[in-house]
Image (cartoon, helix red, strand yellow):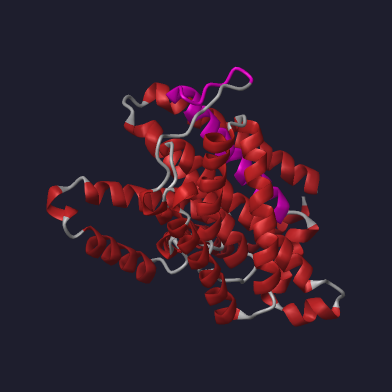
Amino acid sequence: MKTASFKSDFLVAAIALIILLALPTIVAGKAFPDFVIRMSAYAVFATSLNLLIGYGGMVSFGHGLFFGLGAYSFALMLQKLGVSVPVALMGTVGISALVAFIVGAICIRLKEIYFAFLTLAFQMLFHSSIIAWTDVTGGDQGLTGGIPRPPFLGIRLDDPVHLYVFCVVMLVGSLLIMRHLLQTPFGFSLRMIRDNPDRCGFLGIRVWRVKLLAFVVAGIFGAIGGLIMSLYISSAYPDFAYWTMSGEAIFMILLGGMTVFLGPLVGAVTLLLLTDVISSTPALRDYNMLVLGLIILVFALGLRKGILGSMYEWWTDRRRSDSTANPEAHASGSHH
């Protein structure tokens, strides 16, 4: 059963990858590849946060810590240490896993609002460190001088086409891995803990261990989102680790729907499209935050489970009503 589920997920991921790779040849202009790369960074980041919020019931206000950590770790290793891209990538994963383990070990023992605000405190501590450590991070100006991108395995990330392919592969691969993890016993345990942690303890599940593992996994993929963004802009900025970054990810989750795996992806696409349209419209540009806030409010009130979550709920309700209206056909189908 699990093998069949992974095969179907892998097939969907392969089809999505082929479509994303083919689209730049159909859609003319540089704007589309740039949008997809930005969307890839935010989609991986928001989906990683939804592992905690939607599947683990742990609302983190400080997940931007890992977006900023991934961007700065990757960029600094390439800029200051001169390592190859694969080494910088693996180093970023290792650093983010270690930091997530330390922060998570402290935070997961707290409940609800205390957990949320302690994660925010760690994020702001990291943001303050970026501002203060000017010699290394560039302070509030961010990293200057660009990020070197040495070629590896015939891949040149200074080439826009190669960069697009690399970021799209990172997007699809990251989503596939997170999706697969949620189909393992770890994923089912995480959902059980979200619904009833006390009962999970009685069943012998190490609640703190599952929560900590979820925090580490979310931290790793949050850092990968920051890594993609640092490649795109060839730099890293303190804003990546500011509290508003976590807020944007939460908006994406709420817009797309936290109850459906691809909800954060849909939310990322929606929020980026809204932001781009508002900022490119002269009449709305000066009131961009007000307009965006009103639109998000309309979505929140009209689609309480998000875009994809509401669509999924409508589809399941329709199937249920159809099966109720035609019980004989449903029974015949289930019999066969």
* Residue at 50% over, 55% down: 264
Q: Is residue 172 magenta?
A: yes
Q: Is residue 271 visible?
A: yes
- Between 320 and 268, the one lying in front of the other is 268
Up the image or down, 245 lies above or below 6; here it is below
Q: Where does residue 296 sit, x and y in percent of width and height?
A: 33, 64
Residue 143: in magenta span: no
Q: Is residue 300 above or below residue 285?
A: below
Rendering coords of residue 59 (x, y %):
56, 71
Report the label total. Answer: 0
The image quadrant that residue 119 belongs to is: bottom right
Left or right: residue 25 versus residue 11 is left
Q: Position of residue 276 (x, y in %)?
A: 29, 46
User: Which segment did they paint magenta?
Assistant: 153-182
Q: Which residue is nearer to you in this view: 283 or 105?
A: 105
Position of 205 with respect to 45 (left or right) is right
Relative placement, left or right, of 115 versus 278 is: right
Residue 155, image quadrant: top right
Q: Residue at x 66, y 46 (%)?
A: 93
Judged by its main secondary structure, the magenta piece is helix
